[in-house]
């Protein structure tokens, strides 16, 4: 089946690497590996202090540049925070919002993520809104309930005409950084639930345009099985994005799926 949506492979470098030269080297290797054009959309999300340096590396490349967080206010007395306009000014195209390490590690709420989403859209950043259940929630059979709560809260008030420009990332918390990837069937079931929620909220036409990435221990050898699923439109890659060869292997898997079409 031909793809309804382009695939998006994004690398979330988190708080790595700890030297600017290493960030530049990683970005350079990814740029050279991706080449001058790409059927698959690719983005890298380095630490904020390296955004400008990585943007210089990515000039004239099709690779997008993402921040890992932002504040909802346009400017002001918010020590340690970054405004959307600043991210645009240093070349960002994307911003990750509501990553589980911020939701569960730093107490970020759906309401805050919703405010950030509005602020990101207002300045023209493509938000990558993360959601996903914890292990105990999955084991208690509450996965869909958790996803529904996160979708209702973080996408509250989103206008249908803007919804198609939002990227979602389903990242089961138990799969992040653990090496325990969700099976393609498990991930597809969650993605199908998210797609149904989108269709109910925004209508089927818009729901069919929203990119929903999977994240959690994606590696070159498990990427194809996930990306072949009908509702999985890419990957948000943590650990494997720190190694250019591994990240490019995932991009390659996405290109193969994009060329061959979805299996289902
Ligand atoms: P991981 O991280 O690929 O290291 O599991 C994914 C993420 O946190 O986005």
Image (cartoon, rainbow, N blue to C red):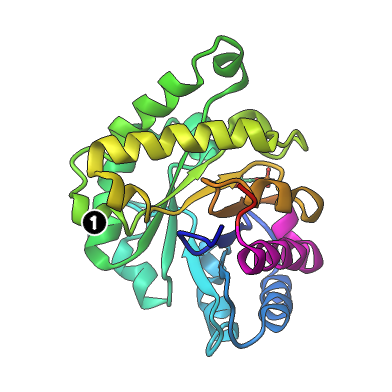
Work out whether residue 224 or residue 14 is closer to the camera in this orientation and state it.
Answer: 224
Which percent across, then down, holds residue 142? 49, 15
Residue 177 within the segment the image draws in magenta? no
Work out whether residue 133 or residue 67 is closer to the camera in this orientation and state it.
Answer: 133
Q: Residue at x 61, y 65 (%)?
A: 258
Q: Main secondary structure of the magenta part?
A: helix
Q: Is residue 193 above or below residue 229?
A: above
Q: Residue at x 60, y 14 (%)?
A: 136
Work out whether residue 246 or residue 239 is closer to the camera in this orientation and state it.
Answer: 246
Name the image quarter holding the N terminus: bottom right
Q: What is the quadrant of residue 13 in the picture?
A: bottom right
At numbered mark 1, what does the secondary structure look like: helix, strand or loop?
helix
Which percent across, then down, holds residue 115? 25, 45
For mark 1, does the 10 Å Cα neighbourhood hold few (<14), some (14 to 19), or many (20 or more) residues?
few
Work out whether residue 72 or residue 180 is closer to the camera in this orientation and state it.
Answer: 180
In the image, the residue with mark 1 has its CB under 8 Å from the nearest atom of ligand 1: no
**How many marks on residues?**
1
Q: What is the quadrant of residue 70 in the picture?
A: bottom left
Looking at the rendering, the stretch of residues picked out in magenta corresponds to 240-261
Q: What is the quadrant of residue 139 in the picture?
A: top right
Q: Residue at x 29, y 52 (%)?
A: 206
Q: Is residue 121 visible?
A: yes
Q: Is residue 194 above or below residue 168?
A: above
Q: Quadrant of ligand 1?
A: top right
Does 230 sit left or right of 131 as displayed?
A: right
Residue identified by numbered label 1:
162
Residue 242 within the segment the image draws in magenta? yes
Which percent across, then down, holds residue 27? 66, 75
Q: Residue at x 55, y 38 (%)?
A: 101
Q: Is residue 33 above or below residue 133?
A: below
């Amino acid at each position: 089946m031909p793809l309804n949506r382009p695939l998006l492979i994004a690398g979330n470098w988190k708080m790595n690497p700890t030297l600017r030269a290493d960030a530049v080297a990683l970005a350079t290797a990814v740029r050279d590996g991706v080449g001058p054009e790409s059927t698959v959309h690719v983005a890298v999300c380095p630490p904020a202090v390296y955004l400008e340096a990585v943007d210089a590396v990515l000039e004239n490349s099709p690779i997008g540049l993402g921040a890992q967080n932002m504040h909802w206010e346009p400017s002001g007395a918010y020590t340690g925070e970054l405004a959307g306009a600043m991210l645009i000014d240093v070349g960002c195209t994307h911003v990750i919002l509501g990553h589980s390490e911020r939701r569960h590690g730093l107490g970020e709420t759906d309401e805050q993520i919703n405010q950030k989403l509005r602020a990101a859209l207002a300045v023209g950043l493509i938000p990558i809104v993360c959601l996903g259940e914890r292990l105990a929630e999955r084991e208690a059979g509450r996965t869909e309930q958790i996803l529904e709560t996160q979708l209702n809260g973080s996408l509250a008030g989103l206008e249908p005409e803007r919804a198609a420009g939002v990227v979602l990332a389903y990242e089961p918390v138990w799969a992040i950084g653990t090496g325990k990837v969700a099976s393609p069937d498990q991930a597809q079931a969650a993605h199908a639930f998210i797609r149904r929620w989108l269709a109910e909220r925004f209508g089927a036409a818009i729901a069919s345009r929203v990119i929903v990435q999977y994240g959690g221990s994606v590696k070159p050898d498990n990427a194809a099985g996930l990306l072949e699923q009908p509702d999985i439109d890419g990957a948000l890659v943590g650990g494997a994005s720190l190694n250019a060869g591994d990240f490019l292997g995932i991009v390659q898997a996405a290109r193969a799926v994009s060329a061959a079409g979805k299996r289902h």
